[in-house]
Image: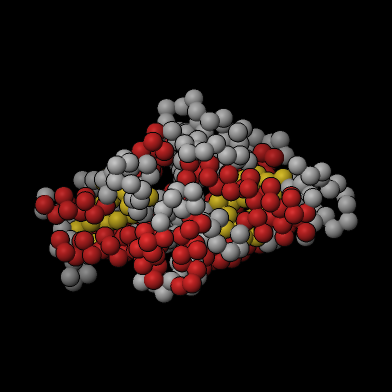
């Protein structure tokens, strides 16, 4: 690794503020997405690199994007979240710029890290747009950080130190934003034709991205019980269901976890049931109103606007089910404030302090610095930062 430029060298930026010290830059790290038809296939090639998926299959997936003009909503949502975070920081008397880097589209993370070094920054805190613990939702981002740092250091000859906030699926900010959205969706679902409360309880389906079952089984630290990805979702879903049942006076409200966006070969087991399959079963049981709560996503990604708002909505319409979709966290004030709280928490830890680490549901508070063997890469061992391996 190239030698570090001393912190006192010309051009080195000062810390952002005492509250965020020792960090001198903040970065939002997102998945990225195409912003025009010509970007769709190159984007999908980057996403699936090393998996041997032919362009013909990628072109089929690309049709989902072309339904929306070849534009994924995720980049616009990242810009909106950056603006909301900067506003929240300023309101707390901590004005700071949020830089932006993507895994699979411009601005690429390695370019952002290079720009940061050239602007004089040396110690960076990353906020990921993924809340849960698994290889694809946590460790892969850590691998991307390692790749980005290596590329930036190679290009500049300057060392860059990077940390990230902890997984936040069960943090109060993310959880309460989802609770607010589900309460509102349940209220809408219960309205009769005249706008009055129909009094019936809809079926509540919490939705997240399906992953290979082997990935779920190995999610969590290497010495843990595994299945952390699903366990986190279930803990959040159980707490939200209880809170919603009280808020809208529906003690009989029931809920379950379902999945969307399955990919990969059919012989490979993935987490189930698929949301469309479950809608079929519910219709057969006489259910006529369903609320979908996409707690697995922080904003209206393509998996939400296509897999739920388009595909699942068509399934429900065919089955005669009224479908109401709850909002994602997006730029909900509780979510934005929670992310800022997590930045300040991580900064305090970096200063050697022991801040409180609030948890809204469950009892497994995940650290920002991952333990050895946490959420391993089951395909190829690769370097990852922000952890013990």
Q: Residue at x 20, y 54 (%)?
A: 279
User: Which colour assignment does the render follow?
Assistant: secondary structure
Q: Is residue 189 left or right of residue 334?
A: left
Residue at 26% x, 45% y is 273
On screen, residue 358 above or below 299? above
Could you tell me residue 363's position as x and y percent? 45, 33
Please state which of residues 341 and 264 is positioned toward the viewer in this rendering. 264
| In the displayed structure image, the side of residue 171 where residue 258 appears, left or right | left
Pick the front one: 105 or 79: 105
Vertical relation: 316 (above or below) 353: below
Q: Residue at x 61, y 59 (%)?
A: 108
Is 77 drawn above or below residue 374 in the view shown? below
Q: Is residue 19 left or right of residue 36?
A: right
Q: Residue at x 30, y 56 (%)?
A: 292
Residue 146 occupies which quadrant of the picture?
A: top right
Tell which residue pokes out farthest to the top in this image: 223
Q: Quadrant of the N terminus?
A: top right
Who is closer to the viewer here, 271 or 264?
Answer: 264
What x and y, as percent, mark residue 25?
71, 54
Q: How far across and how far down the image is residue 180, in percent? A: 39, 56
């Amino acid at each position: 690794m190239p030698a570090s430029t001393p912190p006192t060298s010309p051009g080195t930026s000062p810390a952002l503020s005492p509250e965020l010290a020792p960090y001198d830059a903040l970065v939002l790290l997102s998945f990225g997405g195409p912003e025009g038809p010509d970007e769709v296939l190159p984007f999908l090639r980057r996403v699936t690199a090393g998996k041997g998926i032919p362009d013909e299959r990628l072109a089929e997936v690309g049709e989902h994007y072309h339904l929306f003009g070849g534009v994924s909503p995720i980049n616009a949502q990242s810009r909106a979240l950056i603006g909301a975070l900067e506003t929240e920081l300023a309101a707390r008397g901590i004005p700071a710029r949020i830089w932006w880097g993507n895994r699979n589209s411009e601005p690429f993370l390695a370019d952002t890290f290079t720009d940061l070094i050239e602007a004089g920054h040396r110690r960076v805190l990353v906020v990921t747009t993924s809340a849960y613990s698994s290889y694809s939702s946590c460790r892969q981002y850590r691998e991307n950080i390692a790749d980005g740092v290596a590329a930036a250091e190679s290009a500049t000859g300057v060392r860059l130190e990077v940390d990230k906030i902890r997984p936040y699926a069960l943090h109060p900010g993310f959880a309460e934003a989802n609770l607010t959205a589900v309460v509102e969706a349940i209220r809408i679902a219960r309205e009769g034709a005249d706008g009055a409360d129909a009094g019936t309880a809809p079926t509540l389906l919490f939705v997240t991205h399906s992953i290979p079952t082997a990935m779920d089984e190995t999610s969590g630290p290497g010495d843990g019980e595994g299945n952390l990805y699903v366990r986190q979702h279930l803990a959040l879903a159980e707490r939200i269901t209880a809170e919603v049942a009280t808020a809208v006076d529906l003690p009989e409200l029931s809920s379950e976890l379902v999945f969307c966006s399955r990919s990969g070969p059919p012989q490979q087991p993935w987490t189930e049931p698929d949301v469309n399959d479950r809608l079929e079963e519910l219709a057969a049981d006489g259910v006529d109103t369903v609320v979908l709560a996409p707690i697995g996503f922080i904003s209206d990604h393509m998996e939400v606007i296509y897999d739920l708002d388009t595909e699942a909505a068509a399934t429900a319409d065919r089955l005669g089910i009224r479908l109401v979709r709850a909002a994602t966290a997006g730029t909900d004030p509780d979510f934005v404030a929670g992310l800022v709280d997590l930045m300040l928490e991580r900064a305090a830890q970096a200063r050697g302090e022991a801040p409180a680490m609030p948890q809204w549901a469950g009892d497994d508070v995940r650290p920002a610095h991952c333990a050895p063997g946490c959420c391993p890469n089951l395909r190829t061992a690769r370097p990852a930062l922000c952890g013990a391996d």
